[in-house]
Amino acid sequence: MLLKLITASAIGYGLYRYATRQPETASPVAFATGEATEGFAPVRNAGPDAMASDPKKWDKVDEASDESFPASDPPAAGRFT
């Protein structure tokens, strides 16, 4: 009886560990392979080479906007009006 209980517990624990496992190489979707930095908030380099998908067109305005992010974010609407 004890052997059956130990076996059932071991199988249950194995299934629990399998169901709650974390992916080993989880990277943000918008980042190209190897572009995500370690830490709480991953960061990627600017430019189309650092993106996971290639943009159809990429001009100097797109490049400047990508390089300035997040400094280009506008302030919250109605905060100081």
Image (spheres, rainbow, N blue to C red):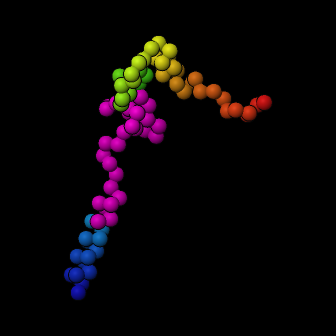
Instruction: Identify the image quadrant of the N terminus.
Output: bottom left
Instruction: Identify the image quadrant of the C terminus.
Output: top right
| Quarter of the view holding residue 19 | bottom left
The magenta stretch spans residue 23? yes
Residue most extreme to the right: 81
| Quarter of the view holding residue 72 | top right
The residue located at (41%, 28%) in the rendering is: 44
Compared across the picture, whether 75 is left or right of 62 comes to: right
Work out whether residue 6 or residue 11 is closer to the camera in this orientation and state it: 11
Q: How far across and down, in percent of the image, does residue 4 sit?
A: 22, 81
Work out whether residue 64 or residue 5 is closer to the camera in this orientation and state it: 64
Magenta stretch in the rendered image? 15-44
Report whether residue 35 is seen.
no
The magenta stretch spans residue 24? yes
- Relative to 56, residue 3 above or below: below
- Relative to 10, residue 79 above or below: above
Report whether residue 39 is seen.
yes
Work out whether residue 81 or residue 6 is closer to the camera in this orientation and state it: 81
- Relative to 43, residue 9 above or below: below
The residue located at (43%, 35%) in the rendering is: 42
Q: How far across and down, in percent of the image, does residue 60 sit?
A: 47, 12
Q: How far across and down, in percent of the image, does residue 43 sit?
A: 44, 31
The residue located at (23%, 76%) in the rendering is: 7
Residue most extreme to the top: 60
Q: Main secondary structure of the magenta part?
A: loop
